[in-house]
Amino acid sequence: MELLVENKFKIVILLLVLILPTYFLVLSPKARKARLNVTNSKRIEVDMDIDQVVKIMGLPNEKLSRKENQYELETFYYAPPAFASDGIFINFNKEGKVEKIVLYE
């Protein structure tokens, strides 16, 4: 009887070890949103305006500002999928149009 309880305990631990990482890497809302960011980013084109980008991508995880030739330029950052080295960056020019799209690597 004691051996049976011990085996059940080991099985439960093994299942937790397998299921929890899968949840966080694949099934969690954050992971699903990151995958959706990748899919949606392929629809973004140069010269789209900020409203069009937000309509496709949703609000960015972070807005970054950079100064270039006395202009305050924006970059939108969207979270990457699991194991990507970096996120998705969408750079806007002074007119608020997409200038460059840098996808995750």
Image: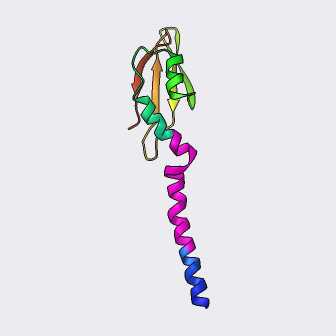
Looking at the figure, which quarter contains the C terminus?
top left
Q: In the rendering, at what x and y percent does residue 52 appear?
A: 50, 18
Q: Which residues are magenta?
A: 12-33
Looking at the figure, which quarter contains the N terminus?
bottom right
Q: Main secondary structure of the magenta part?
A: helix
Decide which of 11, 100 is in the foreground and name it. 11
Q: In the rendering, at what x and y percent does residue 27 appear?
A: 52, 50
Colour mapping used in the image: rainbow
Q: Residue furthest bottom?
A: 1
Q: In the rendering, at what x and y percent does residue 70 appear?
A: 52, 8
- Residue 65 in which image quadrant: top right
Whether 75 is drawn above or below 39: the answer is above
At x 44%, y 38%, the residue is 86
Whether 38 is drawn above or below 94: the answer is below
Question: Is-magenta flag for residue 15?
Answer: yes
At x 52%, y 39%, the residue is 33
At x 47%, y 9%, the residue is 69
Whether 37 is drawn above or below 72: the answer is below
Decide which of 63, 39 is in the foreground and name it. 39
Count of numbered badges drawn on the protein: 0
Whether 94 is drawn above or below 56: the answer is above
Question: Is-magenta flag for residue 17?
Answer: yes
Q: In the rendering, at what x and y percent does residue 57 appear?
A: 51, 28
